[in-house]
Image (cartoon, rainbow, N blue to C red):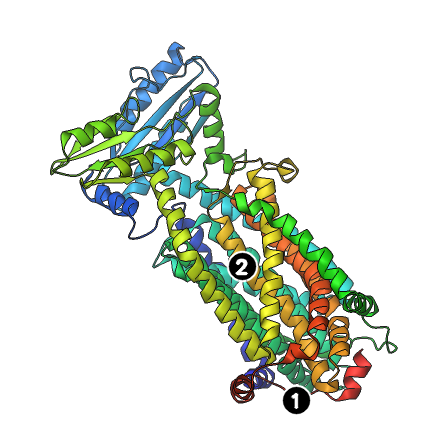
């Protein structure tokens, strides 16, 4: 397949380039429409009690979602302000699609005790179509903002999703403006020429276009979370640079031995292209673990990110070869260096780790386990506006309410749906769980009871309230929904499905690594060392964002828990990224092993010839992730820090020390497989002819 792709790219390079230009136009034209379709409904899990109850209310409740305005900065008793607010209330009630707007001056709890702020909630009618709801929200928000006061903020409900989408679009744009010049500068250092340095950026832009287009396609059939746009874009950009870097380094090496550019491209695709293909497949397989979860968010993220990885992989093995055929003659070959000079530092590191393999294992493994310790106390929550940057309108509204109103004001209630036939005693016990419980009757004999928790929307008070309702209801037709109930159900879903997701991913990775190496022990070693680096990275994220250590240095704060989006995405994506660097190294080790049969020298040669690429790739990926962390959105900060640490720990401590130490410790057994599996690999696995020995020696 790779040879066919290489021939297609070299025979008709202009056709391949034009097809990718068309793809770019679609991505940056049609694909950017995804920003208007993002959702903040992350914790929904189909089939759970909370989701069934929410769907029932959507069908039967005459009231729908609501948005909230907050006016502050001037005494609310001022006559001029009161007249403005009363006129606004009257106008809001007349907007099509608005169900209710209480007067904040006559409704308890809507004016602050210090007299400096008031809340203006607007409840929409139930059953509105998307267009009608959008018109009602825009009209209501616009009318509230006409109130003349120092602070007027509007957010919540469907408006929050729109604001987050706009913020995500701006963050992506800023991250690209920061990362692309820095990446270009680093590539100039690596390649020493503008033409070679620019080609990875062309592939990176293709990755960004692919991210937009893939997300837009998935948004037509399912909800796409606001988190998805940053995660897929950063990964698409980072992996595209990684793959292009690997291919270009190999192309410049091949140019040492042939003046024929087309032949050099063919050899590059046959060697490095194989690694890129396996790397893309391993990242994609790592993300299949997300498909095991019934969560719409996790499944859509898994599919979207996997699609972006495949696009990056295809760009690296089709678009880049076509560009190299057109422009590769002007890219200088890699400089010939005296034997023993190329990769000398990495060879020394490999030899040190090989000689001191027991000492390396005794030092590195406990250190990584210590870093991973905080994971044992990890908590996840939906989070509130404190996760947002202070400059966002939703965060400003939250801060104003927090400053002027009692704790718990504005927190979404625990919603209890008492179905027809619920006995009076059970209903009374439910109402007694929270002071000032509010009830309303729905058609068909259903009663809805809103229980107001005393703390945060997803704090222990709220989740305990959900559990207490479910414990006391017995066999009565009582269901619980709301953000806290969804969080409880999401946590239960993660606990139930996580083992199956782990088995799916590990089995898939094992099969791919076996197909790549023909070894049984190397895949096992790879999985264990990767889990160590992954645990260490996630432990630091918990230590920073949950416990609050050094969070201020990242422009964040300790929140007492991680966003429920962060851990599954960090684990799935970081595991796949770790396979990237493992494959880069294994590809070179295997070449040396096939050429010489000396397992110890294969370890040193493999690291000598791949260490620079792995280090540069990790640094470039860290730059990309770091650029996306400038937006200040806590879930993205958590994901960005987790992936950055996982990449850096894996590319340095694990791949430079643990890999040579453990591979040397295994000795010749590292490439062992039982006879039946060896025969299966010889028949079905991907393999290549051993490189001529003088080539390996020269490159070393």
Q: Pick the residue in front: 432 or 137.
A: 432
Does 267 appear above or below 18?
Answer: below
Name the residue that disc number 1 marks: 689
Near mark 1 (Cα within 10 A), the count class, few <14, some 14-19 or many ≥20, is few
Which mark identifies residue 247? none
**In the visual, does 205 lie left or right of 188?**
left
Percent of width and height locating residue 251: 70, 77
Tell me: 691 left or right of 11.
right
In-front residue for pair 540/394 = 540
Residue under the image location 40 percent in, 34 percent down: 457
Asked whether residue 315 appears in the rendered view, the answer is: no
Q: Secondary structure at mark 1?
A: loop
- The residue at the point 66 percent across, 89 percent down is 689
Q: Residue drawn at (45%, 48%), measured in percent from left and top? A: 226
Label 2, label 1: how far apart the Cα atoms are: 32 Å
Q: Residue furthest right?
A: 338
The residue indicated by pointer 2 is: 573
Can see residue 359? yes
| Identity of the residue drawn at 62% across and 38% down | 551
Q: Pointer 2: residues within 10 angstroms few (<14), some, or many (20+)?
A: many
Above or below, 543 relative to 94: below
Q: Is residue 217 left or right of residue 626?
A: left
């Amino acid at each position: 397949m790779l040879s066919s792709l290489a021939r297609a790219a070299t025979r008709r390079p202009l056709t391949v380039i034009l097809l990718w230009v068309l793809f770019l136009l679609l991505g940056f034209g049609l694909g950017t429409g995804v920003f208007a379709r993002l959702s903040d409904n992350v914790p929904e899990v189909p089939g759970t009690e909370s989701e069934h109850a929410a769907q029932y209310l959507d069908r039967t409740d005459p009231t729908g979602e609501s948005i909230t305005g907050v006016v502050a900065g001037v005494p609310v008793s001022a006559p001029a302000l009161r007249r403005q607010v009363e006129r606004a209330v009257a106008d809001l009630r007349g907007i099509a699609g608005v169900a209710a707007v209480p007067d904040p001056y006559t409704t308890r709890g809507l004016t602050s005790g210090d007299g400096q702020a008031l809340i203006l909630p607007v409840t929409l009618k139930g059953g509105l179509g998307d267009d009608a709801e959008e018109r009602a929200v825009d009209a209501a928000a616009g009318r509230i903002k006409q109130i003349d006061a120092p602070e007027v903020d509007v957010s919540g409900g469907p408006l929050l999703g729109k604001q987050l989408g706009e913020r995500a679009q701006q963050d992506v744009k800023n991250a690209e403006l920061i990362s692309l010049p820095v990446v270009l500068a680093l590539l100039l250092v690596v390649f020493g020429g503008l033409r070679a340095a620019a080609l990875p950026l062309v592939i990176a832009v293709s990755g960004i276009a692919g991210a937009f287009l893939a997300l837009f396609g998935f948004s037509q059939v399912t909800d796409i979370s606001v988190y998805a746009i940053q995660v897929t874009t950063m990964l698409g950009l980072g992996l595209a640079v990684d793959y292009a870097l690997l291919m270009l380094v190999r192309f410049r090496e091949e140019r040492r031995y042939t003046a024929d550019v087309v032949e050099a491209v063919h050899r590059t695709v046959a060697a490095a292209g194989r690694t890129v293909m396996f790397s893309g497949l391993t990242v994609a397989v790592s993300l299949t673990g997300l498909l095991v979860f019934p969560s719409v968010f996790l499944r859509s993220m898994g599919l979207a990110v996997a699609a972006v990885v495949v696009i990056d992989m295809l760009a690296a093995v089709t678009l880049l070869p076509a560009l190299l055929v057109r422009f590769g003659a002007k890219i200088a070959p890699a400089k010939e260096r005296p034997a023993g000079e190329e990769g000398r530092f990495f060879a020394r590191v490999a030899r040190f780790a090989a000689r001191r393999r027991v000492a390396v294992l005794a030092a590195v493994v406990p250190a990584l386990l210590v870093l991973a310790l905080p994971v044992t106390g990890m908590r996840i929550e939906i989070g509130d506006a404190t996760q947002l940057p202070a400059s966002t309108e939703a965060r400003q509204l939250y801060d104003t309410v927090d400053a002027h109103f009692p704790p718990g004001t504005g927190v979404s209630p625990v919603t209890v749906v008492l179905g027809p036939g619920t006995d009076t005693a059970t209903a009374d016990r439910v109402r007694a769980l929270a002071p000032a419980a509010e009830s309303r009757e729905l058609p068909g004999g259903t009663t809805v009871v809103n229980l107001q928790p005393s703390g945060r929307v997803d704090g222990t008070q709220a989740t305990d309230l959900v559990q207490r309702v479910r414990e006391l209801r017995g066999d009565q037709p009582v269901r619980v929904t709301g953000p806290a109930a969804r969080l409880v159900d999401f946590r239960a879903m993660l606990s139930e499905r996580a083992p199956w997701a782990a088995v799916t991913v590990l089995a898939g990775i094992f099969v791919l690594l076996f197909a790549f190496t023909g070894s049984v022990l190397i895949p096992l070693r790879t999985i264990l060392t990767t889990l160590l680096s992954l645990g260490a990275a996630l432990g630091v994220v918990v230590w920073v964002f949950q416990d609050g250590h050094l969070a201020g240095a990242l422009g964040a704060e300790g929140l007492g828990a991680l966003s429920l989006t962060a851990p599954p995405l960090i684990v799935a994506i970081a595991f796949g990224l770790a396979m990237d660097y493992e494959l880069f190294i294994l590809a070179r080790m295997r070449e040396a092993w096939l050429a010489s049969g000396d397992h110890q020298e294969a370890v040193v040669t493999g690291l000598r010839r791949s260490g620079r690429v792995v280090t540069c790739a990790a640094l470039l990926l860290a730059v990309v992730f770091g650029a996306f962390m400038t937006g200040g959105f806590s879930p993205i900060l958590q994901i960005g820090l987790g992936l950055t640490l996982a990449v850096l720990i894996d590319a340095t401590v694990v791949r430079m020390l643990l890999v040579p130490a453990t591979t040397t410790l295994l000795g010749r057994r590292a490439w062992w497989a039982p006879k039946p599996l060896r025969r299966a690999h010889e028949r079905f696995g991907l393999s290549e002819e051993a490189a001529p020995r003088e080539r390996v020696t020269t490159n070393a």
